[in-house]
Amino acid sequence: MNANPIISEILSGAILSIEMELEEYLARSWRCDSLRDGNNFSVKFYDKFGRALTSKMLGTGIDAILSRFDKKEIHLGDAFIQNDSYLSLNGVGDSSEICISQPFFVEDELISFIQVRAQHDDLGGISFGGVSTLSKDSFNEGIIIEPIKIKENGEIREDIFEHIVRNSRQPELLRDDLATKISVLNLGAVQLKELVQRYGKDELKACFSDLLNESKQAFQKIIEENISDGEWRTKRMVAPEHFEKNNIVHLTLTKKNKQLSLNFEGTSQQSEGPINCPLYGDGIKFIARLLTPFLLQLEKDYEQRNNIRANDGGCKNLDIVLPKTSSLVTPNFPAPTALRLLTISSIISGFTELLFKASSGNTQVGFENLNTFSIFHRDKNNRTSLFREAMGSGTGASFNRDGVSSILPLSGTGRISIEITENRYPLHIVREELIIDSGGPGKYRGGLGVTKEFLLKEDSHISLVRNADDMCAVGRLGGQNGSKSEQLTFKKGTRKNSFPSIVSLKKIDAGEFVRVGTSGGGGYGNPLKRNVESVKDDVLRGFVSRSAALKLYGVVFKNNQNLEVDAKLTKKERNQSNRKKK
Amino acid sequence: MAKKVRALRIGIDTGGTFTDIVGVKTDTGEIFSTKTPTTTSDPSLGFMQGIEKILQETKMQDKDISGIFHGTTVATNAILEEKFDNLGLVITSGFKHLLEIGLVTQKETSSGLSNFTSRITQKPLEALVPSERIFEVNERVSSSGKILVPLTKKEVSLLPKLFRQKGISAVGICLLHSYANPKHEKLIRDTFGKEFPECEISISSLVCPEPGEYDRAITTLLDSFIKPHVKNYLDKSSDKIQEKYKEIPFLIMKSNGGVAPNEKIAKKPISTVLSGPAAGALSASYLGRISGREKLITLDGGGTSTDIAVIENSEAKKSSNHSIGSFYLKIPMIDITTLGTGGGSIAWMNTEKRLKVGPQSAGASPGPVCYGQGGEEPTVTDANLVLARSPLHLAGGEIKLNKALAMKAMRNLAKHFKIDPMEMAAGVVEITAWNQVHAIRQATVKKGLSPQDFSLMAFGGSGPLTAGLVAEFLGIENVVIPPFAGMTSAFGLEVVDLMNEHMHRYYRLEDDLNIEELNLIFENLEIEARQTLSDENIPEERQLLKRNIRIQYENESNEIDIEIPSGFVSKVVMKEVIEKFHFYYQKQFNKNFIEQRQAEITNLNITSYGLTQPPNLPLIPSGDESPEEAYKGARLVWFPETKGFVDTPIYYRERLLEGNFIPGPAVIESFGSTTVVFPKQEARVDRFGNLLLVSKSELTKQNKRAGRPTGLHGVGAA
């Protein structure tokens, strides 16, 4: 089906605009801390088959709704709520990451769905925020909501609504935020209706299929031009120091008959810890949506990357094959799942490595991007605050460019302003800097990690998840590894105590300092071949220390203030180092 | 009352291609307007030519000029050039990489990718100032303004030398929480003043005293960067004025909706970015007020961009967040949403074989294909010409357009999609209108407003060409095309008041209010404000002061300004103020925290106005329903609704009379702007010369040709 090019462009622009508009509306309506300051939410548009039409990565699919409800049971005025990670992954968070979806009809015909995903503060479980290393099964992680109607015939089902709210430690905030989600979906439906009235539902459907086709072809072309037939394997340990046994994700990427396929065969048994990541059902789509956009790195032209949508059409080029028996990615209910972000991060990390190999080194090298933590405080009047931040790591370098520092992490929150933090939370921020020498040395340097140091003004509880201590972003082709992430606590003048890589609600006293540091990206190529001027700039900017410049990059400075490079000595130093290496 | 003297107030709006000049005779209210090409290399030349040209038009003399009011793009252009080599930053120690780390929060606008992926796949952004030109100072102020770590004079005294050595000549100073206590920033500024006086300095507590260190640092840096550019330009222009016309007030339009004398502007030039669009919004709110329309959305369509503003209660909405190029600015100004498409936007096919309009623009050179200067890709302007909706010339005949070239380009594009070139042209215009619709929706919904509750006021060269469609798509009932639609921004300079803001950071929870203290602060602010107005020679009867209290919920930072009456502020008044705050908060954020969180006062401020004598807009003569007098001829114009070309009457805008009625389809041409009345719409002319577009009434649909001159129209007659 081919839509009229003009109408197709109008409608595809309108779909993006509806998503953006609803997000704007939500951004100024949220009440709970995670959403208001953390911005961890998204709006996503699906067709009636549950195919995502835009490039948003997170959000559960529609499949669980479609398989649970007969077509005859889905009506105008309905809205579905769900957070059941076993039926379809809602996102990377815990049980309080809740999706609400609304079907859209034209003359009794189901046309599409709009969905809001949002990470709320709490929906029960053994600890505030639902995430805990202690959780032994799904029942410890807050209430489970299979897709059910939260709204029917245009009316909110109050009994169910109140039942859900009753299970939260922050019922007032959750009540308001859920109501906001439900009402915003209507706003989208009204606009869609106006478009259909003007251009007709057939054009809308044709536009959907255009969008999916375009994305499919664009990614097909990228794969065809950059990856030759073959098979590549890797594995990743998930949270090695935790939980009873080794948890390993095995990944095999195959390119055959124009098709990419990612096989999880060999992945270890399901875990006792909450790192299980059920990928069956809609989960396959979830992981494909997460991984497919990385292929865009293979398109050389940045302008062109902007034109390509990574929707479910594009995702069709990447088959996901799961183990046939139970495993970390195919666990049996009720194995706990709230920390599956660790497993998802490992999958991403492994996939980017495979992509690098498969494309003969044309993507970014190693990049570990997992660092999320929260500081929870309850005051005398029982008022709580939850400071949740996911800080960004450095990306890997590539064959023609340095990595980028402090990139936005997967779970979306990103940096929260120092001044806003100090205005709203009982925290004082001592410093926030890029970490010197954290980017993996190389001809092209990895991006830098970032460190933030908090002074707690009140007694608080900290929870965190980060990459394991022996995991760092790997450098390639002579490039070296990026630095590891670190999180520690200390009192002024005392020894520093490192946290393990997973911590749940550890009490920290007022007056103590907490330092959180993210990892650097891997380097690409021999650092001795790095442009001398770039090394000098790095030293001037506090990205690389003078000693690292000498030791790793072989750059010698004349001993003066202006940091002048001694060209002669540098040449000598670099030659010597090169020989030593050989 | 001031004596009636024969005088001429001149408004000059320098745009990218044209400089628009409006002159109003203060005794009769007669309005004159003209255009002259903008002289990009030295805009003061075009500026002076403009004054000459309007004097000729009005047949008045040098000594008649009562004041020159100016909207300038010098600041904006300097920023967009992005040559920031001489720029440095002073920051609180511990935060030297703020500009690198802050990039992560910079929003992606172009792609629909989630932020996570876009950072991995998109071209990396660069920090405005690299870290080697950033210096840390050891100091700390708390969020409530308490000094935690004092800044030593000794440390400050080292800075000027360091910057001088590095060859830095413009410095921004942004210390944490300086909005709550500017003492440290001022100390650094004063030291530079003594030790390195030729260095340009901006301090963040003066530029934008609001929380949010990254945006504040960027805004402060840009302010200091543009200082020499703006100062040079204004000095040059003001010298030329002095030389030629002696002592004439020379006032510059600020983006907050007021004017200030040029010497004052040079101290905080960032206040002039979007000076032209702000004048447009001001103009619209004035024209709306006199004709009884208090709620307007403006659509100011130019060559490369389209500006949108929202007006409620005849006042343009303000905001503190704006983007210019790739930068986000944080200063309170009229909330202008700028859309990167305009008449010059190019229609093209991307590699996904999808039709796109913009964001590339043909600009002023080569310009649209029909300018015949070498452009080959069809633009929105070409599409309108091909459809015969716009005339064969621009600016009243000064620029001739080549329709054949435009047609050829459109045919080439249409071939790729295998559709009819006329359909393609109409589609390009329709996509443009939808882009405008999306931008308007986002500008209104963000503020909790619904576009249907507003009238659409369209002006600028390209606004009135699509306004009819935009209104239809948005469900807006009324479209207003003001008189001199091509000059609306320049006209804004005729109605703008002198405006200053005086504020005092003052943190108090509602329970801890001290009424005496509060009144004392207001009294002092008022004395300061009156003094400033008197210094600017504003007589007392033209002085107006407005008080505002800025309030937020405790531990939040969504601040809202509540206006309060002058005079003693009693406890009762304060209670009302806080109630209003809850109400407005609810309106804007869909929620409030009444009885859950304390309201906290953060700021007391006074906006002082030196009121201008607005022109007495002459009413236009009234005429019959039939616009016979204004009939220019007819030509075949293409509309999708009529499934092809249809014989369409063309009218001269300037000759229309009050009461004239024009059913669509029709085209109304004026100097600098063309209005399309679409087939499903009809237009009426009001006594102020506004053209009002609405959907066709049932009555009109029945008498198909009411109001239209009789007789057959020769094809291509106009």
Image (cartoon, coloured by chain):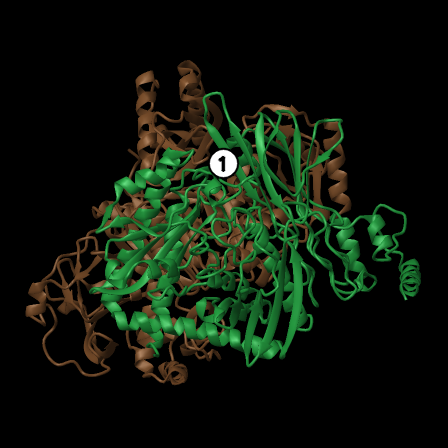
| Residue drawn at point x = 78 percent, y = 45 percent | B165
Tell me the chain of label 1.
A
Report which quarter residue B144 is drawn in: top right
In the displayed structure, B142 sits above or below B710; it is: above
- Residue A409 image position (x, y, % from top left): 57, 51
Left or right: where B131 falls relative to A286 = right
The tally of labels here is: 1
Q: What chain is colored green?
A: A
Q: What chain is colored brown?
A: B
- Identify residue for label 1: A126
Left or right: where A201 falls relative to B524 = left
Foreground pick, B143 / B74: B143
Foreground pick, A384 / B223: A384
| Residue drawn at point x = 21 percent, y = 53 percent | B688
Which amino acid type is marked by label 1? Ile
Foreground pick, A402 / B531: A402
| Residue drawn at point x = 40 percent, y = 24 percent | B598
In the displayed structure, A318 sits above or below B692; it is: below
| Residue drawn at point x = 76 percent, y = 66 percent | A477
- Residue B195 image position (x, y, % from top left): 73, 35
Foreground pick, B128 / A208: A208
Density class for disc 1 (Cα within 10 Å; few <14, some 14-19, many ≥20) is some
Quadrant where the N terminus of chain A sits is: bottom left
Furthest-front residue in this view: A325
Residue B125 visible (yes or no): no
